[in-house]
Image: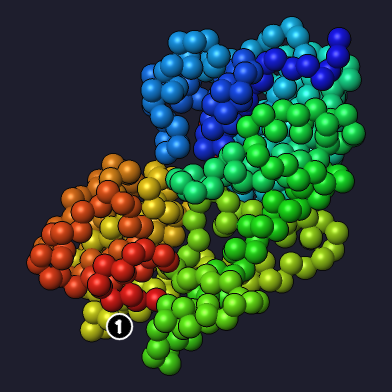
Amino acid sequence: MSRKIFKNVIVIGQGYVGLPLSVNAAKSGYKVYGFDISNEKVEQLKKGHTDSPEIKKSDLLRMQKKGIIEFTSTIPKLNKQSIYVIAVPTPLDSNRKPDLSMLINACELVASVIEDNSLVVNESTSYIGTLRNLIKPTIDKLSSAKNIIYAVAPERIDPGNIKWDMKNTTRVIAGLDGIAGQVTVSFYSKFCNQIHIVSKPEVAEAAKLFENTFRQVNIALVNELSNIADSIGFSTHETIRAASTKPFGFMPFFPSIGVGGHCIPVDPSYLAFSAEAVGVEAKFINLANLTNSSMPKIIAERIKIFLDGNLSSKRIQIAGITYKPNISDIRESPALDLIHELKLLGASVSWYDPFVMKYNDQQSTELNSDIDLGLIVTPHDQIDFSIWKKTGVKVLDLSANSTNYGWTKFL
Ligand SMILES: NC(=O)c1ccc[n+]([C@@H]2O[C@H](COP(=O)([O-])OP(=O)(O)OC[C@H]3O[C@@H](n4cnc5c(N)ncnc54)[C@H](O)[C@@H]3O)[C@@H](O)[C@H]2O)c1
């Protein structure tokens, strides 16, 4: 049987990365099995519920009814060659080193069902060499299937971004051999406008890590500038806007309370891990991690000075605690660290987030004016700030790129 004709796609992991892929592949004519180890997630998807802002409930229900997509918490055994796409989390462990337990588990599950001539594509972000040295050996060792081919196609999705989506964001692809590269390109070109093929998987893996490291380092640099600007007494935002008038050689980044989500605070540590494995010290990455992760403490101290040097029993309310606007993801959100730091300094902290009902036993509380200070951290579009505007409470805007509400841009 030719390995070039694939009709079935099994996507392992139905989160921010896996679900949009399942939907796009199903719309492109594949029969898709959206497999997730979480029974609860699968039950939600069957009802059309998802956290991915770009996926419509009506689409999910319609596609399931048509039978082009099926959600399941048991990895399907199809008895025919298929495409397996791995899209599971790759976090850091408590020592901030790669935790690939979910990726390894995904490989073991794939190995238990995969048939001859199938294609395995990894979309999960991981260290350089993961496809060649971990995914392929794990699956090949546990499966008796022959001629399995392997490729990487790192995902670049930015959940909630309405300008850049899976279709118009170029996809970088590499196969472990020529045929794997070809069939992977043929699959992705059904729903991605532009494909960029690179010579080997290590280049694609490194490019993914480097993109996010570039952001991590530049955000750290501008956060450092904001610390300098605060001590001297000028506006970082105004400075960046002025520097941005240079038409070449400059790209603006804006200060914030730190970095969050499953990518920017995590991926650079995967690159540092690759560096350390070959005896290279990733100095910039380590410094950027430290600079960004120090920001919540620094900001809490600055807020204390702003409130006359004393936060004891001061009532502070935070607007938005997810790591970026208009999504519900709180993974690695620096807002959570800021809450912790403010509480350590004695403040009484409440927060409002329409996407998060409860965190750490604390409930979201509607914005109110019975406070000493409001902090805009993650300005979701649906937050109505009129109560703060009407009552004239003190507000600081800490967000990186919000529209200007007319309040003090603090950073
Ligand atoms: N979220 C982003 O913006 C983004 C962007 C680009 C790349 N990535 C990368 O994509 C990967 C997935 O991230 P995500 O944000 O989609 O994660 P996510 O947490 O949103 O979703 C992952 C899903 O995988 C499921 N899962 C875990 N282990 C499994 C297993 N063994 N078998 C089947 N399902 C399993 C989880 O239940 C979860 O629903 C990560 O490597 C991440 O770094 C994420």
Quadrant for the N terminus, please.
top right
Screen quadrant of the C terminus: bottom left
For residue 375, what is the image quadrant?
Answer: bottom left
Question: Residue 352 in the image: x percent, y percent?
Answer: 25, 52
Residue 174 is left or right of residue 369, and the answer is right
Specify the amino acid type for callout 1. Answer: Ile
Q: Residue furthest bottom?
A: 232
Q: Relative to 62, does residue 225 appear above or below in the rendering?
A: below
Q: Tag 1, which secondary structure? A: helix
Vertical side of 241 occupied by 296: above or below: above
x 81%, y 50%: residue: 203
Whole-percent x and y of residue 276? Answer: 79, 60
Report if residue 35 is visible in the image.
no
* Residue depicted at 58% across the width and 71% down the height: 251
**Left or right of 370, for residue 124:** right
Q: Residue 88 versus residue 154: which sits nearer the camera?
A: 154
Residue at image point 50% right, 61% down: 259
Q: Position of residue 405 (x, y in %)?
A: 26, 67
The picture quadrant where one finds residue 43 is top left
Choose between 246 and 335: the one closer to the eye.
246
On screen, 101 above or below 43? below
Does any portion of residue 87 appear in the rendered image? yes
Where's residue 260, x and y in %? Answer: 49, 56
Q: What residue would you read off at disc 1?
A: 305
